[in-house]
Image: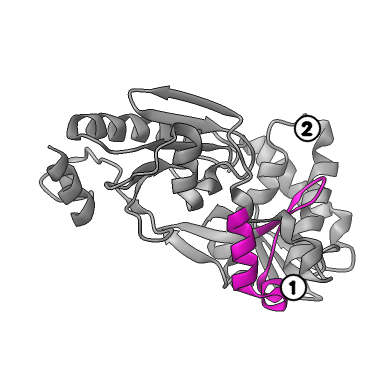
Amino acid sequence: MYNLTTAQHDRLRNLVRRSPVFTGMRVTVHEDRVEVGEPEDLVFGLAPVEDAVAGAPMDQWAGLVDDCLGRILAALTGDTPGIDGPAEEFLDRVHAKLRPADPNLADGWTYAREVAPGLLVMLAVDFPDHIAILNDEQVEQHGYDRLLDAGLHNLRGQLPEECATHEGVFVIAGSAYTASTALVLPWVVEAVTGETDLPHGVLVAVPNDEMLVFHVPRDGAGTRYALDEMARVATEYHAGSPRPLSPEVYWWAGDGAVLAPVTPRTDDAVIGQDFRGDGFAKMLAELG
């Protein structure tokens, strides 16, 4: 979520409250969410609106806010042009997309699956000027399995735009789907390193939409260094991003798309505990 000053936050709430998108509706704007009471009961978080104005001059905020609110309402009400027709017309633009869990949006997206605590897989469709997150009604209309298969397949077309590496830690930057390629991690590793043999899984971090960090465990010392370095990078870039995902480091063990949090913790309360998880701790011990 974009970090606003108190004055900026107040201005944003006023723009939301006065937006012509809500003409004829009863709207209440809270500190962190918007409630629409009529003609439909809708609730959504302010985070996407804050993201929409991230880095833009304040004299452009009104138009950005109106556009964002229009997309949110369209998604919540199922009124998204270009999606209501046959799925064949947009399957090549569907992508599986990682999103942080948001309790304010839970009702409209019950199809979303959790791949890690607080991290969901949703389905998105690309448009020339925005990305639309599909809601329950749209997913039911076209079929979850079919859309997910297409979304995972299309992620493999998201080649890294930038890649840096140091001591076995790879940092990839690219599009709004770069972090979501964690869902097809073996493909990412092969595309970047050429490696296909992953007997110890992969460490991965997704601090924001446009970044993915990974390390392929091969030895104990290298993996411990990579874990600490990835935790530092993930924390830093998560805190400084207008579109954050997670500050955690995860371990992909080869079982589907499940990601287990393994970020090292240094607070005294957990010293002596296996906070990294039994499976990861065992693998790390085997590496020496």
Q: Quick check: can you spot residue 113?
A: yes
Eyeballing the image, is 70 above or below 107?
Answer: above
Quadrant showing the C terminus = top left
Under tag 2, what secondary structure?
helix
Circle 1: is it few (<14), some (14-19), or many (20+) Cα within 10 Å?
A: few
Residue 201 x %, y %: 32, 47
Q: Measuring 89% from the left and 63% from the top, which residue is drawn there? A: 23
Span highlighted in magenta in the image: 124-153
Q: Measuring 21% from the left and 34% from the top, which residue is drawn there? A: 219
Res 37 label: 1
Colour mode of the rendering:
one colour
Eyeballing the image, is 174 above or below 176?
Answer: above
Q: Is residue 74 left or right of residue 112?
A: right
Eyeballing the image, is 51 above or below 71?
Answer: above
- Label count reads 2
Quadrant showing the N terminus = top right
Residue 4 x %, y %: 62, 37
The residue singled out by tag 2 in the image is 58
| Residue 198 vs residue 267, the one in the foreground | 198
The Cα atoms of the two marked residues, 1 and 2, are separated by 29 Å
Q: Is residue 224 left or right of residue 29?
A: left
Q: Is residue 145 magenta?
A: yes
Q: Label 2 is placed on what type of residue?
A: Met
Q: Measuring 81% from the left and 71% from the top, which residue is drawn there? A: 86
Eyeballing the image, is 75 above or below 183?
Answer: below
Q: Is residue 191 magenta?
A: no
Sequence-wise, which precedes: disc 1 or disc 2? 1
Circle 2: is it few (<14), some (14-19), or many (20+) Cα within 10 Å?
A: few
Q: Measuring 36% from the left and 33% from the top, which residue is drawn there? A: 230
